[in-house]
Image (tube, rainbow, N blue to C red):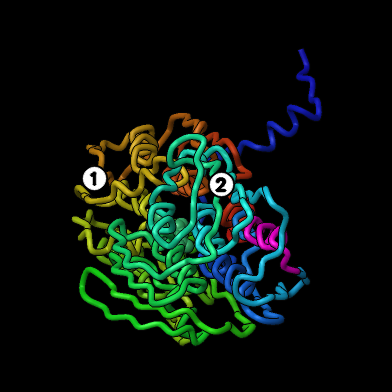
Amino acid sequence: MPILVTPLNLIKMAKILVIKKKINSFKKEIEVGGDKSLSIRWVLLASQAIGKSKAYNLLMSEDVIAALEAIKKLGIKVLIKKKYCEILGKGLNNFTYKNGLVIDAKNSGTLGRLILGLLIKSTKKIKLIGDKSLSKRDFSRVTEPLEKVGAKFQYKVKNKLPLSIIGSNNSKGIYYVENNGSAQCKSSVMLAALNSSGTTYIKAKKSRNHTELLFKYLKVPIKIKRTKKYDFINIIKPKKINAFNYNIPGDISSSAFFMVLTMLSENSKLLIKNININPSRIGVITILKKMGAKILLKNKRNYKGEKISDILIRSSKNLKGIYCPSELNSSAIDEFLIIFIAAAKAKGISYFKDISELNQKESPRLNLGSKILNMMGVKTELTESSIKIYGQPNLKITKKIVIKNYLKDHRIFMMSTIAALTCGGIWKIHDKDSINTSFPSFLKLIKNINSKSL
Ligand code: S3P
């Protein structure tokens, strides 16, 4: 009987990516989209600046668009042009909106947590909602410190979205100890400091420092003392922030998928141009290099406090397992899933410890990552906070693998795609549109690298 193709199952079909063969060797040059963390921070800070700020290469992914929609709802004008995005900021604490406003952070933990910091003085009630994945994540990690600053929060289900925030006219700087190594929590309190009287003191376990670098660039009074494990940050409320233009460099988290794709493909070479190589983000390069990857940073330069370079990667035949030092965890936090695929093809056992935070992400990534490796025929030993991966340099998958029900976690989708293209097998990967969260051009770039690969 012929299959009836109705518009409905057409949509369904289009949502599944089917991969039946490995990628052929390639030698190419690519650019990935703008850095997601910097894109969201630019949007939020431009909303607090006075006047017209412009961003070039702003990542136009769902998380960043949700940030633009959020500030628009708060009365800020946004113009999206072909080559840049413009925000007409009204200065600190100058949002205008009606009581009961609803802000949808969609899938974005960064947006959901950071924007609460900016709402610390917004005394009309605002409801924050998110998608299914974000609604499973813990918000007490930001609402607890922000309550001390002065805001009030109401939850329907304890510590989960949706929540309501009622800001305070009397927000005060606090002493806050951030112990998860979470840049989102640290940044939320830092943004609250922009609108709080007195000094905000933060003792934060190491995490990405884009907010600190932007504050310095914007001349917000900030002092930072670094020790091996913690950063001590003092912030005094600034009088104002001036509008600022920013050329967003490429995202290392997106690049990581292409690094591993190249390493695990034969006779291949890839140049990824213009990537943010902030030291607090390059754990993935350190880890892959320790495993034997051939990665070169070329054309290094500085940009408004950030570091940028091109990244050259070549195939690596003799990868070896790694005992990963946990000091590298925070600087590779979003890249572990793809590092696991490199470990699956490395000689020997790899061990990653103290990574329970991975289960707090868009999906329980430590558990799901391990499950996918097992489906590939790779042995793992999993605990709540660690994983041992028994590498197989000659791993060749011949069976069918179906990836679904993973809370549409963009990085689970991309990890699976790279595994399929480098290890073989017949893969059906559901929820193709999940890439729109962070890396809408992911599949297009794979096709550019090798038009017959997908
Ligand atoms: C981010 C911080 C990290 C990271 C996330 C982006 C940010 O989360 O996983 O993708 O932009 O501040 P945590 O702060 O929860 O570690």
Q: Quadrant of the N terminus?
A: top right
Residue 414 screen position, x and y as percent = 50, 49
Foreground of the two, 122 or 72: 122
Dot 1 or dot 2: first in sequence order is 2
Helix, strand or loop at label 2? It is: strand
Q: Is residue 40 left or right of residue 394?
A: right
262 relative to 346, above or below: below
Q: Is residue 16 left or right of residue 422?
A: right
Q: Which residues are magenta?
A: 65-77
286 relative to 441, above or below: below
Confirm if mark 1 falls within 8 A of ligand 1: no
Three-letter amino acid code at the position of disc 2:
Ser
The residue singled out by tag 2 in the image is: 164
The residue singled out by tag 1 in the image is: 386
Q: Is residue 265 left or right of residue 390?
A: right
Residue 90 covered by magenta stretch? no
Picture residue at 71% right of the left edge, 59% below the top: 97
Q: Nearer the viewer, mark 1 or mark 2?
A: 2
Q: Is residue 113 left or right of residue 43?
A: left
Where residue 119 sits, quadrant-wise, is: bottom right
